[in-house]
């Protein structure tokens, strides 16, 4: 029963994550990246407060923050503040069908950063995964014209790659977090909101937005930043086969490309599919290495 429930939670999370690239592009028609971050972060914080209240852990929030205020400030400034600001701007500059697969290479970036900051050894399969993954990024970014290295938007590609550094850095820093993961995520949103609001007021005024824009940004807040994270945590908590659940995430970018083509009419360049396959191949190689390492443990 637990395995079926874990699979249900995992599939729910993957299907919701598959929709967010489309939701990003729709929302960016109505809001600037900074404004989008402010509203989506607020929605996410409210959703996580409700979940923490339901789980009867909300009363621990203040005590959790007081124990390590600078640590949670650092987490919040990385994610959601810097990460989503950079990611949304990348989506603003690039077609979502390019930004999403490039951002998907964050797990490969994590391997390199873990070697630097956590002292983990990079093995031969990790290097192969890196070559495949970043080779896929180049194919996507140049639309297959690798020899010319002619990028659709050099700044957009740079921001999408930088977002992988921020996300990987966040998870490395998060390995030091011993608190309830939902409370840790909630604190990140709460401490970042004053910075997000201040930046939005400094950069631009707020204009009147139709209900479609508010619906789209609310969807992003709920299903990219908030509820979906909780579904994924529940899936990993209930399963006895973490690798099986984790592998579900490989479905997400392909569903995402299909939605981008059918809902907002983006043209999916053949090079995007080739590059995405290279990135996924690199990630699968990392999964093989992980399985082998787990099997070898006493």
Image: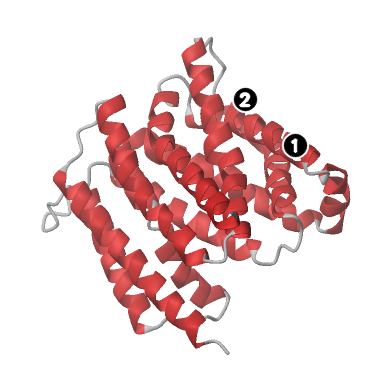
In the image, taking residue 263 as reference, residue 2 lies left or right, namely: right
SS for callout 1: helix
Where is residue 244 shown, x and y percent of the image?
Answer: 45, 62
Residue denoted by label 1: 49
Q: Residue furthest bottom?
A: 298
Q: Residue at point 64% right, 61% down? A: 174
Q: Residue at x 52, y 55 (%)?
A: 166
Q: Quadrant of the N terminus?
A: bottom right
| Left or right, residue 22 beside residue 231 | left
Quarter of the image with the C terminus in it: bottom right
Q: Name, please, the residue furthest toward the front.
A: 1
Residue 70 image label: none
Q: Residues within 10 Å of mark 1 (few under 14, many from 20)?
A: many
Residue for point 53% across, 18% down: 214
Figure quadrant of residue 74: bottom right
Q: Is residue 121 visible?
A: no
Q: Which mark is residue 201?
A: 2
Is residue 277 positioned above or below 272 on the image? below
225 in relation to 246, above or below: above
| Residue 176 position within the rendered picture, expressed as x and y whole percent measured from the top left | 69, 67
Q: Nearer the viewer, residue 55 or 58?
A: 55
Q: Nearer the viewer, mark 1 or mark 2?
A: 1
Picture coordinates of residue 242 (x, y %)?
Answer: 52, 65
Total count of labels: 2
First along the sequence among labels 1 and 2 = 1
CA distance for labels 1 and 2: 25 Å
Q: Secondary structure at mark 2?
A: helix
Q: Residue at x 45, y 19 (%)?
A: 30
């Amino acid at each position: 029963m637990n395995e079926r429930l874990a699979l249900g939670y995992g599939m729910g999370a993957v299907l919701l994550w598959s929709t967010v690239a489309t939701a990003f592009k729709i929302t960016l028609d109505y809001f600037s990246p900074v404004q989008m971050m402010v509203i989506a972060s607020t929605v996410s914080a409210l959703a996580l407060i409700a979940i923490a209240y339901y789980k009867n852990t909300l009363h621990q929030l203040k005590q959790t923050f007081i124990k390590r205020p600078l640590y949670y400030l650092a987490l919040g400034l990385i994610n959601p503040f810097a990460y989503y600001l950079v990611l949304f701007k990348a989506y603003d500059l690039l077609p979502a069908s390019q930004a999403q697969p490039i951002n998907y290479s964050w797990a490969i970036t994590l391997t390199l950063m873990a070697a630097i900051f956590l002292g983990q050894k990079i093995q031969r399969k990790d290097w192969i995964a890196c070559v495949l993954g970043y080779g896929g990024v180049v194919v996507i970014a140049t639309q297959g014209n690798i020899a010319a290295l002619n990028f659709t938007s050099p700044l957009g590609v740079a921001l999408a790659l930088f977002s992988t550094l921020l996300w990987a850095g966040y998870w490395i820093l998060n390995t030091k977090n011993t608190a309830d993961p939902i409370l840790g995520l909630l604190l990140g949103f709460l401490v970042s909101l004053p910075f997000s609001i201040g930046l939005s007021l400094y950069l631009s005024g707020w204009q009147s937005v139709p209900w479609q824009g508010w619906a789209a940004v609310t969807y992003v807040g709920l299903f990219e930043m908030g509820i979906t994270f909780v579904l994924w945590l529940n899936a990993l908590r209930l399963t006895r086969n973490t690798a099986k659940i984790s592998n579900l995430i490989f479905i997400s970018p392909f569903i995402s490309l299909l939605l981008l083509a059918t809902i907002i009419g983006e043209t999916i360049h053949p090079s995007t599919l080739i590059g995405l396959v290279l990135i996924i191949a690199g990630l699968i190689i990392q999964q093989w290495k992980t399985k082998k390492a787990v099997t070898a443990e006493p």
